[in-house]
Image (spheres, rainbow, N blue to C red):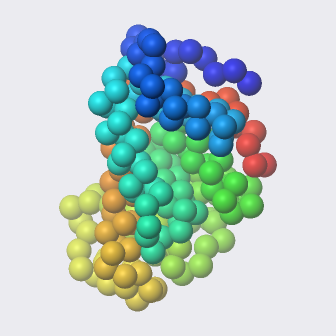
Amino acid sequence: MTDKPNVTALNLPMMDPLPAPVQKYFDICQEKLGLIPNVLQAYAFDQSKLDAFSALYNDVMLADSGLSKLEREMIAVAVSSVNRCFYCLVAHGAAVRELSGDPALGEALVLNYRVADLDARQRAMLDFAVAMTEASYRIDEADREKLRQVGFSERDIWDIAAVAGFFNMTNRIASAVDMRPNEDYHAAHR
């Protein structure tokens, strides 16, 4: 399917021509993913904003961590569910389906992670991410201790908070500008 050229409700056209590093990045996305994620196209009106978004995303979601890629995607979906972010629910729900090989897990996380078949570690992780999303000021040592009790390290707790924090920010931006997910995500990995 072809993506719509205007991926948000704002009239912020992509840089034209795209700078060589951006074009190379988009070419890699097209080759590896079969598409250029609309979130990247949305940020492509300004190279510094695209670079900042991409650097933070890559650090939070792809850098070395005690959290697996699937666990980070699960956090993205649970947080996005609370925030009702259409873009992230569709895009990261597809990622959960792909990484887990379980379409039902992806759907459960989109609707209500509490109904998903999760182990104690995953449940504690998502409980923390959702508590942080709903009222971060209420997080206290008891919440962090629950994560330690199921095997998360201090660094892992940082990473859970970083992923949840990142998606709380991006959910709000995506919703405010009516960012639309790539059509391909809807049917992916079902």
* 73 relative to 13, above or below: below
Q: Is residue 147 visible?
A: yes
In the displayed structure image, the side of residue 67 where residue 113 appears, left or right: right
Near-viewer residue (107 or 55): 55
* 105 relative to 1, above or below: below
Residue depicted at 46% across the width and 86% down the height: 150
* 131 relative to 93, above or below: below
Near-viewer residue (183 or 178): 183
In the displayed structure image, the side of residue 97 where residue 9 appears, left or right: left
In the displayed structure image, the side of residue 94 where residue 40 appears, left or right: left
- Quick one: quadrant of the N terminus? top right
Measuring from the top left, give residue 21's x and y in whole percent: 43, 31
Could you say which quadrant of the image residue 125 lies in? bottom left
**Residue farthest right in this picture:** 190
Q: Is residue 146 visible?
A: no
- Number of marks in the image? 0
Could you say which quadrant of the image residue 138 lies in? bottom left
Measuring from the top left, give residue 29's x and y in whole percent: 59, 37
Residue depicted at 48% across the width and 70% down the height: 67
**Residue farthest bottom in this picture:** 149
* 57 relative to 148, above or below: above
Residue depicted at 31% across the width and 79% down the height: 154
Measuring from the top left, give residue 164's x and y in whole percent: 38, 57
Measuring from the top left, give residue 114's x and y in whole percent: 56, 65
